[in-house]
Amino acid sequence: MDINNLIQQIAVAALPVLLAITLHEAAHAYAAKRFGDATAYMLGRMTLNPLKHIDPIGTVLLPLLTLMLGGFLFGWAKPVPVNFGALRNPRVSARWVAGAGPLANFGMMIGWALLFKLAISTDSYFSEPLRLMSQIGVSINITLMVLNLLPILPLDGGRIVETLLPPGVAYRYSRLEPYGMWILIGLIVTGLLSPILRPFINLMYDLLRFFL
């Protein structure tokens, strides 16, 4: 890849990627505080400052690699610490805390899609950069939302599933959490993650085209 082209892509992708990851984690922190656990708030994680959420590998290295290799943008931030025992009505509250991140990505997906429509409907110096930035904003937010909703602990989808299961089954399900990241890594290494995510990613694009 041409170095100048790569620098241009990084410049265009930086804002939507940082916003997608930062607002996802800040939403978790806000929801946790709203439902009774101020751990993340006291640690300064209920903030839009990306430096508080950046993970060197997941927020910087991995998005750069996926950008260079031409795959869908992929990454993560430092997880927000949540003391689920401190939440009011822990099972229901934990469901909202887990869902807050994907909901934030859903909102940003719609916002970037609207900006994309604005970019293609106007003819100015900023139209093309805004179009490219909006495309990346839609892509990263859809990918993060779909990925995090996979029913694998400690992902948000796994946490939501855990809160919906009967207590005994939920306990047995929770014991799989130490293996969750290994399962995710295995899906990435074997190339199975993309085929699993792709139908849901395509569904979100279809919904955007239908409603917007």
Image: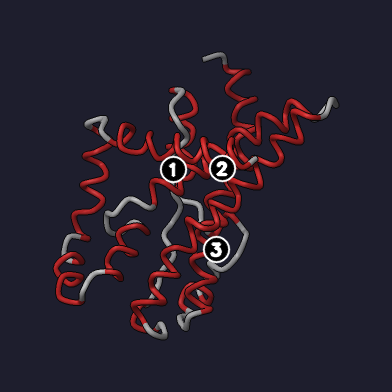
Tell me the number on the disc at residue 26.
Answer: 3
- N-terminal of the two: label 2 or label 3? 2
From the viewer's side, name the closer residue of 114 and 52. 114
- Residue 191 figure quarter: top left
Mark 3 to mark 1 CA distance (whole Å): 16 Å
Residue at x-position 58% and y-position 45%: 109
Q: What kind of residue is marked 1?
A: Gly
- N-terminal of the two: label 3 or label 1? 3
- N-terminal of the two: label 1 or label 2? 2
- Residue 136 figure quarter: top right
Q: Which residue is mark 2?
A: 17
Crowding near the residue tagged with mark 1, few <14, some 14–19, many ≥20 C-alpha atoms within 10 Å = many
Mark 1 to mark 2 CA distance (whole Å): 9 Å
Instruction: Say left or right for 6 vs 148.
Output: right
Q: Which residue is mark 1?
A: 75
Residue at x-position 72% and y-position 29%: 129
Query: Residue 169: x percent and y percent?
Result: 16, 70
Q: Secondary structure at mark 1?
A: loop
Query: Residue 164: x percent and y percent?
Result: 29, 69
From the viewer's side, name the closer residue of 34 and 206. 206
Q: Secondary structure at mark 2?
A: helix
Q: Are marks 3 and 1 in contact (CB under 8 Å)?
A: no
Query: Residue 168: x percent and y percent?
Result: 15, 75
Q: Are marks 1 and 2 in contact (CB under 8 Å)?
A: yes
Residue at x-position 40% and y-position 72%: 82
From the viewer's side, name the closer residue of 207 and 123. 207
Q: Secondary structure at mark 3?
A: helix
Tell me the number on the disc at residue 57.
Answer: none
